[in-house]
Image (cartoon, rainbow, N blue to C red):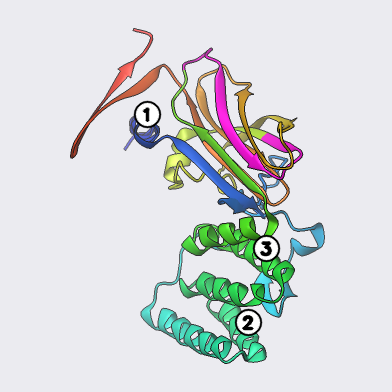
Amino acid sequence: MSRARFSTVSLVWALSIIAISGCGWSAPTSGSRAMGPKAPSDASDIRTPIRGHDLDASTHRGSRDVGGALVSVDDDQSGGRRKTDEAYESAARKLLDEMNAAIGKKDGETARRLLRRIERRYAKSKIAPQAVYNFAMWVERNDKKAALTIYLGLMKRYASSSYANSATYRVRSITGEYLYMYSSKTYQPGETIRVSVSSRALPKLEMQLWSVDLFDYIQQGHDPHYPYLAKMRRRKMVKRWFETPKNARWYSYSNIEVPVKKPGTYLLFVNGKYTSAGVLLLVSDWGMVVKRSPGKILAFLTHRSK
């Protein structure tokens, strides 16, 4: 398929997603799903995923022992080709069962040892994020601070896993922070763009606006409801600024104006200390009209300036 044709299909896909369901996402900032890592503040920092909390510089390389669990804080390892060999997954599952049994017996030393083995030998398995999450849940009973670090490491390393999404809710519960951002439409060039932002327990919000290539975005297989920047090859920061919520101690609701007028595809992120959220913004003369009835949806593409 030619790039021109693919770009048209990509636009239709993106417009249909936004027209039917809108776009919104929240996450902890260790790298963000409903709490997850911050957006990188610099275009060269491709290492940092958008979901999860930015750990201090000393933890960006290698791994460290947190709460007895070996939690890697290197680049997101969930991307790329996964090993799907049945024996590989079966071996990982066996270790997970043994780890869960050790947790049931309150044998922390054995559980930690088994988790280390899973992380080292079966990091590419589907079992690995589940093992980290299960262990973190157990640690949280007695040490929320240690559990928080494990959850954030999980979201950073296994950002595409469903367990990363579950971890974001645990981070939200531990920290009390909350962020959510929503945009329900596509925008015409020159139109004033405003997005809805909800936050809790955050005195300051860092905003980051990135210009991305729609073709690249679709090709990477990104879910528009969970914007993710780390794997984007063609990207450029448009602007970085700060917003002050009206109520920093409790819930605050704001409509924030986004400094974009030109056609294009943009990712907008808002970062707190432990939380982050993002939306996909489309600025185009093309729009998707959607009609709904029970069991049916009729959608067609139209040029809004005509």
Dot in front, 2 or 3? 2
Identify the image quadrant of the N terminus.
top left
The outermost residue toward the front is 250
Mark 1 falls on what kind of element? helix
| Mark closest to the chain's N terminus, 1 or 2 | 1
The numbered mark at residue 74 is: 3
Pointer 1 residue: 4
Q: Nearer the viewer, residue 7 or 174?
A: 174
* Three-letter residue code for mark 3: Asp
Q: Residue at x 45, y 82 (%)?
A: 93
The residue segment tinted magenta is 188-207
Tell me if label 1 and label 3 are in contact, CB under 8 Å: no
Marks 1 and 3, how far apart at CA: 36 Å
* Three-letter residue code for mark 2: Arg
* Three-letter residue code for mark 1: Ala
Dot in front, 1 or 2? 2
Magenta span includes 197: yes
Pointer 2 residue: 116
Q: Is residue 15 in view from this perspective?
A: yes
Magenta span includes 228: no
Classed neighbour count for the residue bearing mark 2: other residues with Cα under 10 Å, few (<14), some (14–19), many (≥20): many
Q: Residue at x 74, y 39 (%)?
A: 248
Identify the image quadrant of the C terminus.
top left
Q: Position of residue 87 (x, y in %)?
A: 39, 83
Rendered image quadrant of residue 256: top right
Q: Residue at x 57, y 62 (%)?
A: 167
Q: Nearer the viewer, residue 272 or 122?
A: 272
Q: Is residue 200 above or below residue 20?
A: below
| Mark closest to the chain's N terminus, 1 or 3 | 1
